[in-house]
Image (cartoon, rainbow, N blue to C red):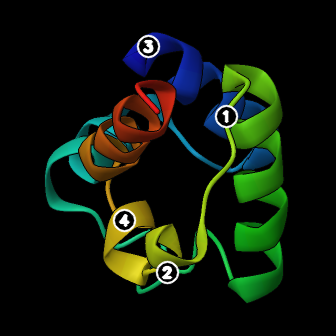
Amino acid sequence: MENRLIKLLKELIPTLKDQEIVELSENGGMLKRGYIDSLNLIEIISKIEEEFNINFVDEDMKMENFDTIKSIVRIIIKRSSH
C-alpha cells in the first residue's frame, strides 16, 4: 500500500525526489516544506480516494492525517476497513 501511495504522490508532486520521500515518510512536513498547498491537498485527497477506492469522512480531514506518508497509510487502512 505504501508503494502505491508513493507512486501516486510522485505523479501528483513531480518535484518530489526519492530522498525527500524517505524524509516525508518518517518526519512529514509536506505543507511546511512547500511540497503541497491547500489546493494540492484537495487533489491529493481525491486521487487517494479514487486509487484506494475509499471515502474519507469529515473527521479524517485533519492536517496531521496527511502530513506524513505513514499517517496517510494509517488513514487509508482505517477507511479501507469500514
Nearer mark to the viewer, of 1 and 2? 1
Q: What amino acid type should be assigned to the residue bearing mark 4?
A: Asn
Lower position in the chain sequence, tag 1 or tag 2: 2
How many numbered marks appear?
A: 4
Q: Nearer the viewer, residue 45 or 67?
A: 45
For mark 1, does the 10 Å Cα neighbourhood hold few (<14), some (14 to 19), or many (20 or more) residues?
A: some
Disc 1 target residue: 54
Q: Nearer the viewer, mark 1 or mark 3?
A: 1
Location of residue 62 by image quarter: bottom left
User: Counting residues from the N terminus, which is met first, the one under dot 3 or under dot 2?
Assistant: 3
Q: Position of residue 24 (x, y in %)?
A: 31, 52
Alpha-carbon span between mark 1 and mark 2? 23 Å
Q: Are marks 4 and 3 in contact (CB under 8 Å)?
A: no
Q: How far, Cα to Cα, is label 2 from label 4?
A: 12 Å
Instruction: Compare marks 1 and 3 and give the one earlier in the sequence.
Output: 3
Answer above or below: position of 10 versus 29: above
Whether pointer 2 and pointer 4 mark residues with C-beta atoms closer than 8 Å, the reply is no
C-alpha separation, residue under disc 1 versus residue under disc 4? 15 Å
Specify the amino acid type for callout 1: Ile
Assess disc 3: are there few (<14), some (14-19) or many (≥20) residues with their C-alpha within 10 Å of its C-alpha: few
> How dense is the environment of label 4, judged by Cα within 10 Å: few (below 14), some, or many (20 and up)?
some
Residue under the point 69% across and 83% down: 37
For label 3, the residue is 1
- SS class, disc 1: loop
For label 4, the residue is 65
Using the image, determine if residue 38 lies above or below residue 36. Answer: below
| Separation (CA) of disc 4 from disc 3 | 16 Å
Q: Tag 3's secondary structure? A: loop
Q: Which residue is mark 2?
A: 31
For the residue marked with disc 2, what is the amino acid?
Leu
Residue drawn at 35 percent across, 38 percent down: 78
